[in-house]
């Protein structure tokens, strides 16, 4: 059931993932049937991210990005939404909306259906200092 849900989520938004040191773009096409769905999964080398342009983000967004970087560096895994709530002393909806905003602005990406899957798409030298 979880695999099926992940495949449907990837149909809407292709997934970038690293396999054997290379970055791949996974796309899913679904042929919906009466009793079951058929999935066609393709993988292609992902285009390189453009790190030459300076990303645009607000001061608060920059703090969230810096928190993601520092938390991941210390704990060797990305933060959960609860970690953001504790650090920034905000409500769960506020954290979730910020994560969605950062993802929409292509500053981070997440793996659908997988906890703690935030990955920064911003070069570390472009991040502000965490306050």
Image (cartoon, helix red, strand yellow):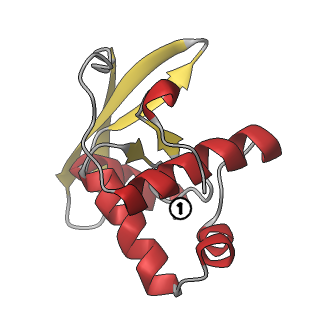
Q: Tell whether 27 sits left or right of 122.
A: left
The percent position of residue 69, horizontal first and vertical second, equals 60, 42
Residue drawn at 42 percent across, 31 percent down = 126
Front-lying residue, 64 or 117: 64
Quadrant in which the C terminus is drawn: bottom right
The answer to whether one can see residue 117 in this image is: no
Front-lying residue, 30 or 9: 9
Q: Label 1, secondary structure: give it.
A: helix
Q: Tell whether 103 sits left or right of 63.
A: left
The answer to whether one can see residue 1 in this image is: yes
Front-lying residue, 117 or 29: 117
Residue drawn at 45 percent across, 49 percent down = 110
Q: How many numbered marks, from 0 up?
A: 1
64 is higher (above) or lower (below) than 53? below
The percent position of residue 62, horizontal first and vertical second, equals 43, 51
The percent position of residue 27, horizontal first and vertical second, equals 28, 34
Q: Tell whether 71 sits left or right of 115.
A: right
Residue drawn at 49 percent across, 49 percent down = 65
Residue drawn at 33 percent across, 47 percent down = 10
Q: Tell whether 94 sits left or right of 103.
A: right
Residue reaching furthest right?
Answer: 75
94 is higher (above) or lower (below) than 46? below
Query: Which residue is tagged 1?
Result: 2
| Crowd band around label 1 with a 10 angstrom C-alpha radius: few (<14), some (14–19), many (20+) | few
83 is higher (above) or lower (below) than 103? below
């Amino acid at each position: 059931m979880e695999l099926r849900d992940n495949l449907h989520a990837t149909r809407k938004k292709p997934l970038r993932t690293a396999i054997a040191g290379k970055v791949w773009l996974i796309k899913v096409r679904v042929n919906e049937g009466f009793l079951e769905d058929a999935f066609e999964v393709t993988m292609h080398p992902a285009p390189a991210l453009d790190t030459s342009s300076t990303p645009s983000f607000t001061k608060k967004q920059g703090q969230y990005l810096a928190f993601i970087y520092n938390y991941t560096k210390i704990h060797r895994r990305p933060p959960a939404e609860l970690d953001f709530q504790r650090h920034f002393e905000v409500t769960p909806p506020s954290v979730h909306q910020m994560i969605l905003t950062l993802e929409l602005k292509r500053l981070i990406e997440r793996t659908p259906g997988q906890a703690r899957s935030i990955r920064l798409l911003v070069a570390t030298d472009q991040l502000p200092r965490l306050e």
